[in-house]
Amino acid sequence: MNSIQAIDALDTDSDRGQIRIVILREPSLLDAIPVGPGRIPQQPIVGFRVEDGGIGFDDKNMKSFETLDSQFKADQGCRGVGRLLWLKAFETVAITSVYRDGAQFFRRSFRFSATAGVQDEVVSQVTDSTATGATVELTGFRPDYRQQSAKLGETVAKSLLEHCLWYFVRTGGAPPIQVIDGGSVYHLDEVYEDYIQSGAEVARFDLGGYSFDLIHLKLTPQSNAIPHLNWCAANRVALEEPLAGRIPGLYATLGVEARQFSYAGYLLSPYLDDRVRSERTGFDLQESIERHSEDVLDVDVPPELSMHEIREQALREISRFLADALAASVEAGRQRVEDFVSHHAPRYRPILRLIDERQVGIDAGLNDKELELELHKHLTSLDAEILREGQEVLGQSALKTKGDDYQERLDAYLTKVEEIKQSDLIAYVSRRRLVLDLLAEAIEWDGDGKYVREDRIHNMLMPMRTTSDDEQRQSVNNLWIIDERLAFHNYLASDKTVRSMPITGSESLKKPDLLALQTNPEPLLLAEGKGPRWASISLIEIKRPMRDDAGPGEDRDPIAQCLRYLRLVREGGVKTATGRPISNAASIPGFCYIIADLTPTLKEQALFHQLAPTEDDLGFFGYHSPYNAYIEVVSFDRLVSVARQRNRAFFDIAGLPV
């Protein structure tokens, strides 16, 4: 910045001076060793050297340099403390300069540090040069600052451009500036051309009697672009604020296709110049000021403004400047959400109206995962709002002091609850649809012509080696695929020994694939333990798809296997999971399900047990009188098909294809 001002101070525009910023890196022995293709490893930055062809360190500039809080360049917004800030990040500064005094030229050199101040100053007349300028070398980059600093030359160049962008967009532009990093040279005017998509537009507004300029820039989209408002002082950035979430439709990228751009605004005002902090990292302004209705900002004696008031006016100006692009962005976001909800996430359909009412926009550029997270965030927020509103509308104080609008508030609250709960229901239905799709995929053979093992299908229905007492497993129970009634169980076990089950006293070490005990709830008028308990036991055996080795005997006959498990449980006595007795336990009804493909050997065993084929020939069913058991053999195709049919009405309502 000092170099730009030094060049501006020249008497002539001919042969305008230029600025070179040389990045100094830690030397390495590897520098002399040739390297292969790819990015060359770079040593840490240890300092910078800034060279300019400006007016130089003449006596006036030197006097200002040695004066604390100098007002020498106050008209340019300078506070006279910049050189002190150098020493916060660097241990030592070495300065060499050539300046003109009348017809003669002089060279001034000195060193500057926090411990010794200005030292080793030498001034001598120059007879071999008529070019003025200065070289400022900043060395001893302090570790805390070095670690946070940019590491790459191109990043340093871009950051410098953003910091002093005002000088590039002003009339006359900036002097030529180069950033030199070893063999790489970055010209800031070229970086500016790549950075800026179109010329700057300046909007002026007055607030509370103060004048502000807002420079609107459309930037070439970058991968990490974030729309931002830069608060400037002394023609440089003092504070950068992201604009995400402040203006509906304003996202990292606006526009369409080849005309896409990112936005950046630069806010300037003498009001900000007068209130910037010495280190230029913020402003001595309150975030907000409480004003009364009779207060008027535009008065003869202008009042102090708050950051909030200035920011809100700037946001209105930005909204006007980007009106067309913002409208297109909002519409694209709504269409993106509509398509996503229609085809991938119907659970959010009931709450879209509520989200629109909040004027919450969605970036059309979000991928499916990001969009799902964004919608879920809004749903969570709505859930919290519903809870808060419920406490207000249905709380004791509200019920005791019902106002004239109470019924209206209650109706609005109940409507919102209904819409959100519809979302929960659709989410549950969508999960069922996904599970059925996964099951249909699992029973097909893979690229090698092999079928999955039965344990994979078993785990889809219910994780193996778990029981209904494992609370963390409840959410992955998908036994509704077989029979909806299995959801209402008193006890459920998956791949557990009969001996380990608390519902029976059997000592058998046999392991049914799945076993469920269902009990009817007690009639309300009967006390605990006094009424009869009706109960049933369901047993489920799962076989590998297309497994064709069924035959006589319990070890090979899955139907006989189920009946044997039923007998073992009954013989051990049957009681509830909490130890309450069940009447007629020895003859408790049984339901046996064999989930397997109808291979020739399994069909033969089904006929042997006198089971009848289903109407679609995809299964067998029948009643085994001696065992008081209903038996059903279900092929995998029938299992998926019937489950889809049972849930079809729900899928239709949720907008899911069958």
Image (spheres, helix red, strand yellow):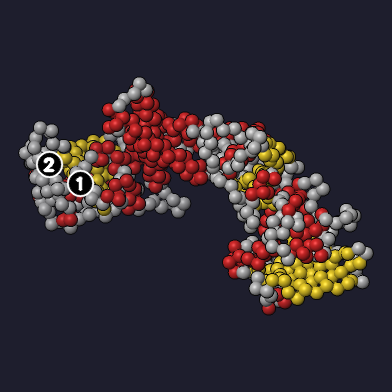
Judged from the image, the secondary structure of the residue bearing numbered disc 1 is strand
Outermost left residue: 530
Residue 240 in view of the camera: yes
Q: Nearer the viewer, mark 1 or mark 2?
A: 1
| Left or right: where 611 falls relative to 389 | left
Residue positioned 58% across, 66% down in the render: 144
Residue positioned 64% across, 61% down in the render: 150
- Image coords of residue 394 (percent x, y): 30, 31
**Residue 96 figure quarter:** bottom right
| Left or right: where 606 falls relative to 445 | left
Judging depth in this view, the residue of 581 and 498 nearest the camera is 581
- Image coords of residue 265 (percent x, y): 66, 44
Task: State which tag comes first along the sequence, 1 or 2.
Answer: 1
| Left or right: where 381 falls relative to 515 | right
Judged from the image, the secondary structure of the residue bearing numbered disc 2 is loop
Residue at mark 2: 588
Judging depth in this view, the residue of 369 and 488 nearest the camera is 369
- Image coords of residue 267 (percent x, y): 67, 44
The circle on residue 491 is 1
3D distance between C-alphas at marks 1 and 2: 15 Å
Residue positioned 14% across, 48% down in the render: 578
Judging depth in this view, the residue of 254 and 402 nearest the camera is 402
Look at label 2 and name its amino acid.
Answer: Ile
Judging depth in this view, the residue of 600 and 569 nearest the camera is 569
Badge 2: how crowded within 10 Å, few (<14), some, or many (20+)?
Answer: many
